[in-house]
Image: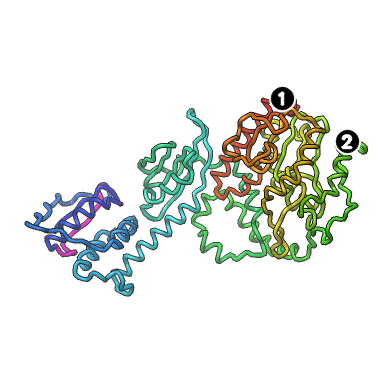
Amino acid sequence: MYRIWLESPVDMDGWRAAARRLALAGVAPEMVGWAVEGEQDALFDDDVLPPMPDGDAAFSVPRRFVELAQTAICHADPERFSLLYALLLRLREERGLLEVAVDPLVARVEALAKAVRRDIHKMHAFVRFRAVATDEGEHFIAWFEPEHHIVEAAAPFFQRRFAAMRWSILTPERCAHWDGGTLRFTGGVPKSAAPTEDALEELWRSYYAAIFNPARLKVAAMQSEMPRKYWKNLPEASSIGLLVRDAERRAQAMVAAVPPAPNPQPQRQGATAMATGEPGTPLEELRQQAAGCRECPLWAPATQTVFGEGPEDARVVFVGEQPGDSEDLKGRPFVGPAGQLLDRALDEAGIDRHKVYVTNAVKHFKFEPRGKRRIHQKPNAGEIRACRQWLSRELATVQPTLVVALGATAVSSLVGKTTSLSSVRGKVMKTDGDTDMVATVHPSYLLRVPDEAARAAEYQRFVADLRHIGELDPSVRAA
């Protein structure tokens, strides 16, 4: 009887070296006992492996077996090493064995690999990072309880996704750590080592509730994809029960409600804009003139022209891309989800929105109808050029000392040429009208970031950009 000790539960190199030597010596699977150091008591001394045969003793196996073994070895089943060795021996005689899906040994090993892949997928989907302040700066920590030995296999995904963050994923068996340059692993820790909540979780719960569609709720499918055993570590889980219980009432309310609809008639030549300023002022007159603009085709399907609003003597002007669905219906800029996020970020940055002027590079909502919904479309260069006269006249009337470009479209409109946001973000530069300009992301970008931790990091960076605005012009700071 040969006793083979492996260094870790996923010691593929150790298993592979021992399995090759045993196979070359013709040792039967039932004559080999596999164990992991530290997991089992060493009741027997290590047996000496059989000697390597003389001559050319090399043999090969299909690449698919190696890939299958690398995955299956991560399973928690203690028999996985023996099963893989038995499969290796058979493959030496039956090269096409892996193609026989109904073979009991092949099916069992494939089932191990499938369970591991599913566990890795669940780890990718259900890890929730929480921000922790450290001496080195912000560190994001998550707690997860995998079913199998998957931490090393799953960690590179997070390394790629959150390359700019410092993070740790803690589990009872193994922990992964990324410092921005090196991925390393340490032993497991108790759950008490992980933080329980951070300041952004209430925002995440609000966002989850906002996107929860009661009309499409299928409880069985939801619990199949997101099993209850993961809920205890998900901040949104505390909201799920209430959302499910209230789903039928909300769905009926959605059916009964008549949603606000865009104007089915195109704007007419004599259209007037919603007044938001003092009557008779230069800015209000400009707003009324813009209401009849027909320089590009965007006016036809839009409900109305959406002009800027704010103090006519504002020292700082924020310029976005174009109005969205809510803005098109209400006739005011930044009143939809992106505008609400901007308000929150301005508040955190200490800037009073009532002290700044907000507008857009393009004054009409560009969209693509999809059923009853209107999906935002990015304006093209011709549409941006057609609207530049209105933006230029707005800026000439307000005469700000600083313009804040929100997104690449605003940057290109203000400098008069196509410019990437990444090349100018945070830098003080000049508009084509020789006004100081600073660029940052559009708040709608933050709403599109799919991952919670990445979204939180990008939001904090956006708030930092806004704080910089307040430092450049303290007049916009909240009292």
Q: Nearer the viewer, residue 152 or 42?
A: 152
Task: Give how far across and how far down residue 120 sits, in percent.
Answer: 42, 55
* Apparent side of residue 446 relative to residue 333 in the rendered image (left or right): left
Inspect the image, locate mark 2, and give the three-letter code of the amino acid beneath it: Pro
* Dot 1 alpha-carbon crowd within 10 angstroms: few under 14, some 14 to 19, many 20 or more: some
Q: Is residue 295 highlighted in magenta?
A: no
In the figure, 13 relative to 91: above or below? above
Q: Residue at x 68, y 25 (%)?
A: 472
The quadrant in which residue 262 appears is bottom right
In the figure, 431 relative to 98: above or below? above
Residue ranking furthest to the right = 280
Q: Which residues are magenta?
A: 27-37
For marks 2 and 1, the one nearer the N-term is: 2
Inspect the image, locate mark 1, and give the three-letter code of the amino acid beneath it: Pro
Task: Give how far across and how far down residue 417 sits, in percent.
Answer: 65, 40
Q: Nearer the viewer, residue 32 or 257?
A: 257
Task: Give how far across and how far down residue 247 sits, in percent.
Answer: 67, 62
Check disc 2 and report the residue beneath it.
282
Q: Nearer the viewer, residue 312 or 245?
A: 312
- Image quadrant where one finds the C terminus: top right
Check disc 1 and report the residue beneath it.
474
Q: Residue at x 56, y 66 (%)?
A: 220
Q: Is residue 31 highlighted in magenta?
A: yes
Q: Residue at x 79, y 55 (%)?
A: 302
Q: Nearer the viewer, mark 2 or mark 1?
A: 2
Task: Give how far across and how far down residue 190 sits, in percent.
Answer: 42, 43
As measured in the structure, the alpha-carbon distance from the residue carrying label 2 to the one carrying label 1 is: 26 Å
Q: Secondary structure at mark 2?
A: helix
- Image quadrant where one finds the N terminus: bottom left
